[in-house]
Amino acid sequence: MRAYGHLANVYFLDYNLGYLLVATLLPTAVAREASTWVALALIIVGYFLLHSAVIAFDDITGYRDGTDAKNYQDNPSALRRAKWKPLVTGELRLGQAVRFAWTCVAVGLLLLLTGLLMTPHHPLALIALAVAGVCVSLQYSYGIKFSHIGFQEMVLLLWTLELVLIPYWALTGGLTGRILVEGALFAFWLMMVSMYSNLRDLETDRGAGRLNIATIAGERNYIRLLGALAVADILVVGVLVVTGILPPLLAALLCPVFAARLAQFRLGALERNPLLGRLLGRRLAWAGAIVMAIGNLVVSG
């Protein structure tokens, strides 16, 4: 069971924090309905299993092309250990991993669709969009392998956005500017976690023929890009506060998160410690989601 847990990376709960944004931005009338929370629970578990499948498929591909062995065994780090890759360590066989991944797909999709159909608003367009997002994400590094042909960052960003926007839309019947902004910030922060990993794995990925921003841009240009992205969300939030889309209180609460973003760039990119940058990225995504959820409760209260 531990090996399957490592394969699905069930301890990587970062993406689930996005549901705090959904829960704290629900209109009062929706939040008071017991059926809301039953449907949301089914959606969350469904997406959790589907995300587990995405990660398992990524490990299957990494095992087949040898990149996981190079990144985790040949280039070990205390911040990223080989024990998280049970195919590499031999704890699981390839066939076991493939069956596990497809089981997660089947059960996860069933629960997701059940939860969506229980919500007050489930037009065909919403169901189709949710399923399409799942299909694209499952091929992140399996099937079409979007992460190998230049769409890695885009798929990660859109997948995280789906986890936030689809439940909110289904429960409320639409999307607000606030949920769009907060969902985009959260998705951006989690995308940056992967981007710092790519800095560490640049040469291995390039040797395997993977196309992502890091392998295309090269180390120097990629570090410049990380620097620009380290201040991009700060500037965007500032503009949104000035234009009245976001309350000033939320920007004030996010100041420690923005400070951590700058520290992430300095330590992870300028000082060439990308795995520390990755770890800081995870922590600031947690903090950012919690802070935005608190801000939502305070403003609505």
Image (tube, helix red, strand yellow):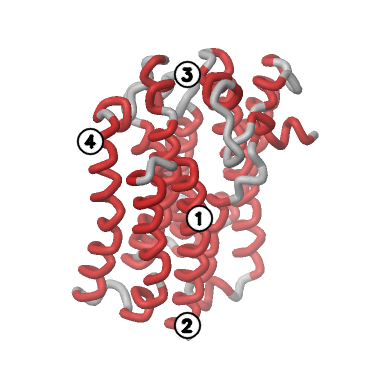
Whether pointer 4 and pointer 2 mark residues with C-beta atoms closer than 8 Å, the reply is no
Q: Distance from label 4 to label 2 (Cα)?
A: 41 Å
User: Going from the N terminus, do you reach mark 4 or mark 1 first?
Assistant: 1
Residue occupied by mark 4: 221
- Classed neighbour count for the residue bearing mark 4: other residues with Cα under 10 Å, few (<14), some (14–19), many (≥20): few
Q: Earlier in the sequence, mark 2 or mark 1?
A: 1
Q: Is residue 108 above or below residue 102?
A: below
Q: Residue at 54% x, 67% y: name it.
A: 23
The first of marks 3 and 2 along the sequence is 3
Query: Can you see residue 232?
Result: yes
Which element is circle 1 on? helix
Q: Which residue is mark 1?
A: 167
Q: Which residue is mark 3?
A: 143
Displayed quadrant of residue 169? bottom left
Check disc 2 and report the residue beneath it: 298
Amino acid at pointer 4: Asn
Q: Nearer the viewer, mark 4 or mark 2?
A: 4
Name the element at disc 2. helix
Q: Is residue 34 above or below residue 93?
A: below
Q: Position of residue 152 (x, y in %)?
A: 38, 32
| Amino acid type, mark 3 | Gly
Q: CA distance from mark 3 to mark 2?
A: 45 Å
